[in-house]
């Protein structure tokens, strides 16, 4: 499953979901690199 995360205030990374961390962040894999950050949620539609 592909997920998008934010790292810091303005950097986004999209990669394959690896795992969820206890503090609410998730880990995604891009190539051989792993990134941890806050998941981006889909906007609410009315």
Image (cartoon, rainbow, N blue to C red):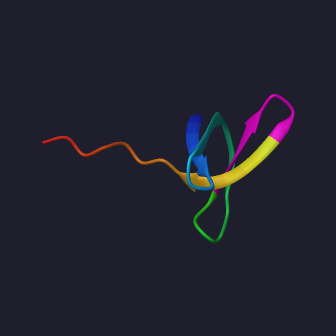
- In the picture, the quarter occupied by the C terminus is top left
Residue for point 31% across, 43% down? 43
Q: From the top left corner, tell me how far across and down residue 45 is, in percent.
A: 19, 41
**Which region of the structure is painted magenta?**
26-33
Residue for point 62% across, 60% down? 25
Q: Is residue 21 above or below residue 5?
A: below
Q: In this view, does 34 lie above or below 36?
A: above
- Rendered image quadrant of residue 13: top right
Q: From the top left corner, tell me how far across and down residue 27 is, in percent.
A: 70, 50
Indicate yes or no whether the magenta region holds residue 31.
yes
Indicate yes or no whether the magenta region holds residue 39.
no
- The answer to whether residue 29 is left or right of residue 41 is right
- The answer to whether residue 3 is left or right of residue 29 is left
- Rendered image quadrant of residue 26: bottom right
| Furthest residue toward bottom | 23
Q: Which of 8 and 3 is in front in this view?
A: 8
What is the tally of numbered marks visible in this picture?
0
């Amino acid at each position: 499953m592909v997920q998008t995360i934010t790292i810091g205030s303005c950097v986004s990374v999209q990669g394959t979901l690896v795992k969820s961390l206890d503090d609410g962040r998730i880990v995604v894999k891009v190539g051989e690199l792993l990134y941890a950050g806050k998941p981006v949620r889909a906007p609410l539609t009315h």
